[in-house]
Image (tube, rainbow, N blue to C red):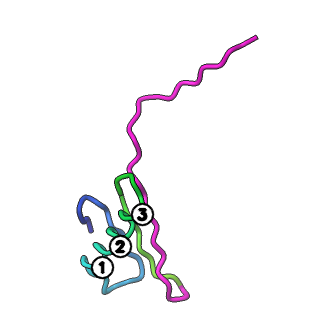
Amino acid sequence: MKIEGVEVKVMGLDDFTAEEAQKYIDYVKDRVEDPLKSIEVKLCDDGKIDVDYTLQGEKFERIRRITGCQ
């Protein structure tokens, strides 16, 4: 599912709703400065929820390293 441009992947939670996804998105957005690209919500074997997210990085064309030789 996609909410507010954020790709949401859910594993192990069959009854997961869009409202719950929105709460996880809001939680992560409150703690990071960069735009959120995707979020993965997974039910662990111990019954806890694992939340993993990816941020959108800055676009750049190349990185150049200039060193001096002697």
Q: Amino acid at mark 3?
A: Arg
Q: Relative to residue 70, is residue 52 depicted above or below? A: below
Q: Amino acid at mark 2?
A: Tyr
* Residues at circles 2 and 1 in contact by the CB criterion of under 8 Å: yes
Q: Depth check: 32 or 14 in front?
A: 32
Q: Relative to residue 48, is residue 29 depicted above or below? A: above
Q: Which residue is mark 1?
A: 20
Q: Secondary structure at mark 3?
A: loop
Magenta residues, as a range? 45-70
Q: What crowding class fits label 2: few (fewer than 14 Cα within 10 Å), some (14-19), or many (20 or more)?
A: some
Q: Which residue is mark 3?
A: 31
* Residues at circles 3 and 1 in contact by the CB criterion of under 8 Å: no
Q: Relative to residue 59, is residue 43 depicted above or below? A: below
Q: Depth check: 36 or 29 in front?
A: 29
* Residues at circles 2 and 3 in contact by the CB criterion of under 8 Å: no
- Tell me which secondary structure the magenta stretch mostly adopts: loop
Q: Which residue is mark 2?
A: 24
Q: Secondary structure at mark 1?
A: helix
Count of all numbered marks drawn on residues in the image: 3
Q: Residue at x 41, y 77 (%)?
A: 11
Q: Amino acid at mark 1?
A: Glu
Tell me where residue 6 sits by quadrant: bottom left
**Relative to residue 69, is residue 63 drawn left or right?**
left
Quarter in which the N terminus is drawn: bottom left
Q: Position of residue 23 (x, y in %)?
A: 31, 75
State yes or no: residue 38 in magenta: no
**Pointer 3 or 1: first along the chain:** 1
Q: Residue at x 37, y 70 (%)?
A: 27
Q: Secondary structure at mark 2?
A: helix
Q: Residue at x 45, y 72 (%)?
A: 51
